[in-house]
Image (spheres, rainbow, N blue to C red):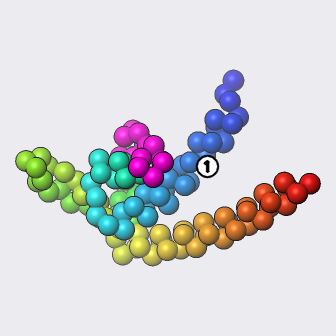
Amino acid sequence: MSDPFETLRLELRRGSLVLAVLAALRSEQYGYTLRKALEEQGLDVDEGTLYPLLRRLESQGLLQSEWREEEKRNKRFYKLSTDGRRVFKDLLGEWEGLATSLEGILKEGSAR
């Protein structure tokens, strides 16, 4: 039997991770630096989650990528596409609205 908290925690993280990745890719990065940047902000993401997400976001037209040689290694650099910037802006507005609503609901619940 699965742990309901763990299932819900993963659902919450999954949606938040998309927004975090889009936000971080407002400036170009490759996978490893993106993972480290997210980690430095307190969001640990393993490679088995991050790289499939990057491929999915690229296939949806939200990211652009290109292979380049850096430090004698080929690295795939990602950045937001034009559609990605638009979707990020829209998702950010949605997130802010949800956060405001949740904040009110949670404060109301703690006042009881």
Please report the residue visible at 14 percent of the width from the left and 57 percent of the height from the top: 68
Give residue 3's quadrant in the image.
top right
Question: Is 20 displayed left or right of 55 in the figure?
Answer: right
Residue pointed to by mark 1: 12
Q: Residues within 10 Å of mark 1 (few under 14, many from 20)?
A: few
Amino acid, disc 1: Leu
Question: Does residue 98 lie above or below 15 as drawn?
Answer: below
79 in relation to 4, above or below: below
**Residues in magenta, as a range:** 39-51
On screen, residue 101 above or below 18: below
Quadrant assignment, res 5 = top right
Q: Residue at x 78, y 65 (%)?
A: 104
Q: From the viewer's perspective, is residue 97 above or below residue 34? A: below
Q: From where the camera sits, is residue 72 visible?
A: yes
* Quarter-of-image position of residue 80: bottom left
Q: Residue furthest right?
A: 112
Total number of numbered discs in the rendering: 1
Image coords of residue 54 (percent x, y)? 37, 53
Quadrant in the picture for the C terminus: bottom right
The x, y position of residue 66, in whole percent, is 21, 60
